[in-house]
Amino acid sequence: MLDDRILDLLIQRARVVEDVADAKRGLGSIRPGREAAILRRLLTHHQGPLPRGAIIRIWREIFASSIAQQQNLQVAVCDPAMDGRFLAAAREHLGALTPMRVYRSPAQAIGEVADGRASVAILPLPGEGTGDGNGPGWWPGLLQHNAKGRIHVVARLPFWASRPEGTASVQALIISNTPADPSGEDISLIALEVPAQVSLGSLSNAINAAGIKPLSMLVHRPSGVPVAFLLVEVDGFVTADDPRLGLIAGLQAPPMIVGAYAVAIAEESAA
């Protein structure tokens, strides 16, 4: 029967995953960029009546089971309102049966990853704020861990834009203790230290002049210090050795790569 053939292929895939896990024992198995590239490829070749959204859901569970074969994945979910919305988004992306713990503040979830108690954390999209780790301005606290090479942004949720009624609609980032990997169509996050009174317009021009396209900026100006910190979304997968980073004028310190995430599949591609 057809269902038996599908199961046989899944068993075969699991054996391949097992061989790969044995070969890279001790290395991280979180590869959001590679997963995104696979999903884009599958949707490009897919035809017939099976909904494209179903392809994404099926393979997300396949990815989750493959990760579970390779490591004991623990997920820390920041759900500020404790209403289950971020938990639902996490399960949609990382698997219905993946172990997850829920925390009210971003700082708590980040701390779980920093201390090794969780492999990844789900955090609300960053925004302006005090930078105390308990609101949308949580991202300055992440920079301290990122500077030590310990935590990286690796994905953004949701990965597909089609949001049927009842599905998770929150926007979130995934951070991990392993670096991001490229998907072929990405957005990178870089942190910049600049003079406190810098003009965002002039800084945007400086980034453009270096050959990097800025997409958005968040600024944090700590009180009592003459510098400001910016979190900048830029087009493409940018690495620390990218020579364009050294061409950005007016910085107080070298740019820091915070991470990257795959561009979401457009609604018409996943409907």
Image (cartoon, rainbow, N blue to C red):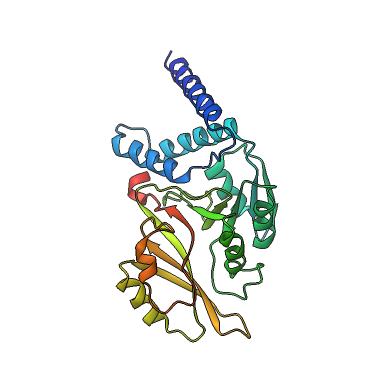
Rendered position, 243 above or below 74: below
**Does residue 234 sit above or below 28 in this rendering?**
below
Residue that appears at 59% across and 36% down: 26
| Quadrant of the image occupied by residue 131 | bottom right
- Decide if residue 243 is on the left or right side of residue 92: left
Question: Residue at (50%, 28%) from the top-left corner?
Answer: 20
Q: Which residue is farthest top?
A: 1
Query: Where does residue 25 sit, x and y in percent of width and height?
Result: 58, 32
Residue 170 visible? The answer is no
Q: Give the percent coordinates (x, y) of residue 17.
A: 50, 27
> Who is closer to the viewer here, 61 or 203?
203
- Count the numbered circles shown: 0
Q: Looking at the picture, how far across and down is residue 208, in whole percent?
A: 32, 72
Q: Residue at x 70, y 59 (%)?
A: 108
Quadrant of the frame with the N terminus: top left
Image coordinates of residue 229 in percent, x first then y, are: 53, 75
Residue at 45%, 20% (x, y): give it.
Answer: 9
In the rendered image, the quadrant that contains the C terminus is top left
Q: Quadrant of residue 237?
A: bottom left
Q: Is residue 247 visible?
A: yes
In the picture, measured across the screen, residue 82 lies left or right of residue 18, that is right
